[in-house]
Image (cartoon, helix red, strand yellow):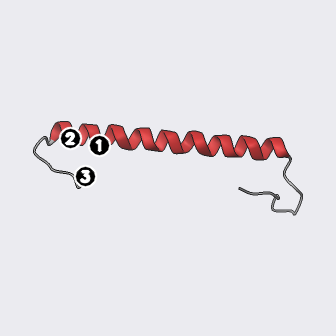
Amino acid sequence: MTTHHRDGQPVPERDRAWEAERRRRMAKLRQDSAKRTLEVIEQKFPDLKTGN
């Protein structure tokens, strides 16, 4: 998480909180997308074995 802007000014606390929340949302979206992708692959190739 960045605590300072490029020009050296500190980032206000609420902006850092917003940035952290945005990161969490993006990570969840990526995770959900990966799950959906895996489900589609498993439907198209039911005999394909995954490593787990």
Front label number (3 vs 1): 3
- Direction from residue 37 to residue 4 in the image, left or right: right
Task: Name which residue lies at 87% across and 63% down.
Answer: 8
Of helix, strand and loop, which one carries label 1?
Answer: helix
Disc on the earlier residue, 3 or 1: 1
Q: Position of residue 22 (x, y in %)?
A: 64, 41
In three-dimensional space, the C-alpha distance between marks 1 and 2, rounded to whole angstroms, equals 6 Å
User: Label 3: which residue?
Assistant: 52
Q: How many discs mark residues in the rendered view? A: 3
Q: Amino acid at mark 3?
A: Asn
Task: Name which residue lies at 51% across and 40% down.
Answer: 28
User: Label 1: which residue?
Assistant: 38
- Direction from residue 29 to residue 18 in the image, left or right: right
Q: Position of residue 11 (x, y in %)?
A: 84, 52
Disc on the earlier residue, 2 or 3: 2
- Label pair 1/2, CB-CB below 8 angstroms: yes
In three-dimensional space, the C-alpha distance between marks 2 and 3, rounded to whole angstroms, equals 13 Å
Residue 27 - label: none
Q: Position of residue 49 (x, y in %)?
A: 16, 50
In three-dimensional space, the C-alpha distance between marks 3 and 1, rounded to whole angstroms, equals 12 Å
**Quarter assignment of residue 17:** top right
Is residue 7 shown above or below 14?
Answer: below
